[in-house]
Amino acid sequence: MANKRIKLGMLVMVLVFGMTVVGCASLIESMTPPTFSSDFSGTWIRPDSPYNYTLTLTSNTLRASNQNYYWNLRRVNGDRYTVSASSDSNSYSYIYIRLVNGHLEITETNESFGNAVFGDGGEHDWTGTWERQ
C-alpha cells in the first residue's frame, strides 16, 4: 500500500510539473511580440498607382511614404495583421497581406485605417499588388 502511495505521489508531481511547463510556455508565447513575415521586410511600390508612394515594412512596423507616422504591428492571425498608428496606440486597424510570386498582395482592409480609404483607387488606397523596390 505504501508503494502505491509513493507512485501516486510521484505521478501527481509529474503532472503538476508538466502543467506548469505548458502554462509557462503559453505565457511566454503570448508575451512574444508579433512580427511580419521576414519575406515582407523592405520597401514596396505599386506600379499601377499614379501616386508613386512606397510602403516600407520592418519586422514590426509598416510605413507609407505619404504619411508622417508608423503603423505598429499588434497581432497576427494568418494573413490578417492588426496594426495601430504610432500616433494613437488605442486606434486599431487590420490589413490582409500575403506574398504571391514574390509580390506583396494587400487584398482587404477594414474601412477605417487612419486617413486611408481602401478600394477607392485614391492616394491612400493600399489594396493591390506591390513590387519590391
Image (tube, grey):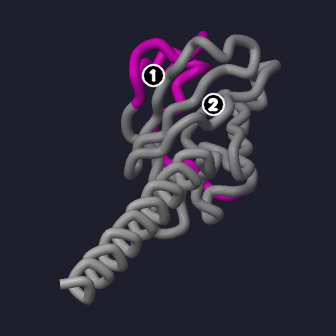
Which of pointers 1 and 2 indicates the residue nearer the eye? Answer: 1
Say which of 13 and 94 sits in front: 13
The part of the image, by quadrant, that contains residue 132 is bottom right
Q: CA distance from mark 1 to mark 2?
A: 15 Å
Residue at 50% x, 22% y: name it.
93
The part of the image, by quadrant, that contains residue 68 is top right
Judge the density around disc 2: few (<14), some (14-19), many (≥20) Cα neighbours within 10 Å.
Answer: few
Residue 101 in the image, given as x and y percentages of width and height = 47, 69
Residue 91 in the image, given as x and y percentages of width and height = 57, 13
Mark closest to the chain's N terminus, 1 or 2? 2
Is 55 placed left or right of 34 in the picture?
right
Is 68 placed left or right of 48 in the picture?
right
Q: Is residue 77 above or below residue 88?
A: below
Residue 105 in the image, given as x and y percentages of width and height = 47, 50
In the orientation shown, which residue stands out farthest toward the right?
A: 68
In the orientation shown, which residue stands out farthest toward the front?
A: 2
User: Which circle marks residue 32 in the picture?
Assistant: none
- Would you say the residues marked 1 and 2 are in contact, meaning their CB atoms lie under 8 Å apart? no
The stretch of residues the image draws in magenta is: 109-133
Residue at 46% x, 60% y: name it.
20
User: Which circle marks residue 50 in the picture?
Assistant: 2
Residue at 39% x, 63% y: name it.
16
Q: Would you name the residue on which mark 1 appears?
A: 118
Judge the density around disc 1: few (<14), some (14-19), many (≥20) Cα neighbours within 10 Å.
Answer: many
Q: Is residue 75 above or below residue 28?
A: above
Q: Secondary structure at mark 2?
A: loop
Instruction: For the C terminus, give its image quadrant.
Output: bottom right
Please name the amino acid that badge 1 sits on.
Answer: Phe
Q: Is residue 113 above or below residue 45?
A: above
The part of the image, by quadrant, that contains residue 18 is bottom left
Say which of 39 and 16 sits in front: 16
